[in-house]
Amino acid sequence: MGGFVATLLYGLPRATSDLDVLLIVPQEQRASLLELGARGSMLHRKYKVYLDYVGVAKVPENYEDRLTEIFPGAFRHLRICALDPSDLALSKLERNIQRDRDDVSIWSTPSRWT
């Protein structure tokens, strides 16, 4: 979720270096995965991207049914899934900060989809 998904999948024209993570399964892998991908980690230094665990976020009901896998089959033990555009927009608007409102406004402009 967040700016990474909006940029990578849905064409939002702004840079981001964090990958917001809503859920890590199995849960017992959360701490080690977040440590490997934390800001300042080797992953961050090498690829300029880091994991940002979003423990509390409001997402639409049944969002799991609408997830899209990013890079399917690219990793043996990892699946990265993204919120669909409507769920992402609703989650960003729920937070109600100016940057998120601007993102949704830019990316929901009808001319961006033609």
Image (spheres, rainbow, N blue to C red):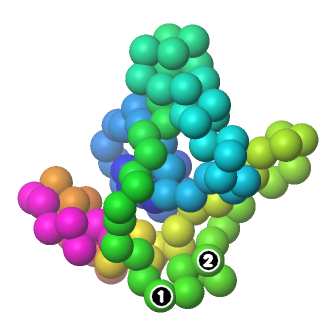
- Which residue sits at x=41%, y=70%? 88
Please tell me whether residue 77 is drawn above or below residue 61 in the rendered image.
above
Q: Position of residue 25 (x, y in %)?
A: 69, 55
Q: Position of residue 34 (x, y in %)?
A: 55, 34
Please tell me whether residue 5 is drawn above or below residue 43 in the rendered image.
below
Q: Is residue 23 left or right of residue 29?
A: left
Magenta segment = 91-98
Q: Amino acid at mark 1?
A: Glu
Q: Is residue 7 left or right of residue 33?
A: left
Magenta region includes residue 93: yes
Whether residue 71 is visible here, answered yes or no, is no
Numbered disc 1: secondary structure: loop
Of the numbered discs in the image, which one, if any, rests on residue 61? 1
- Which residue sits at x=53%, y=68%? 83
Magenta region includes residue 13: no
| Closest to the observer, 83 or 25 | 25
Whether residue 55 is visible here, answered yes or no, is yes
Residue most toward the front? Answer: 28
Numbered disc 2: secondary structure: helix
Q: Position of residue 17 (x, y in %)?
A: 40, 32
Instruction: Determine contact: label 2, label 1, CB under 8 Å.
Output: no
| Closest to the observer, 65 or 111 | 65
Q: Is residue 51 left or right of residue 66?
A: left
Of the numbered discs in the image, which one, if any, rests on residue 64? 2
Q: Report which quarter residue 66 is drawn in.
A: bottom right
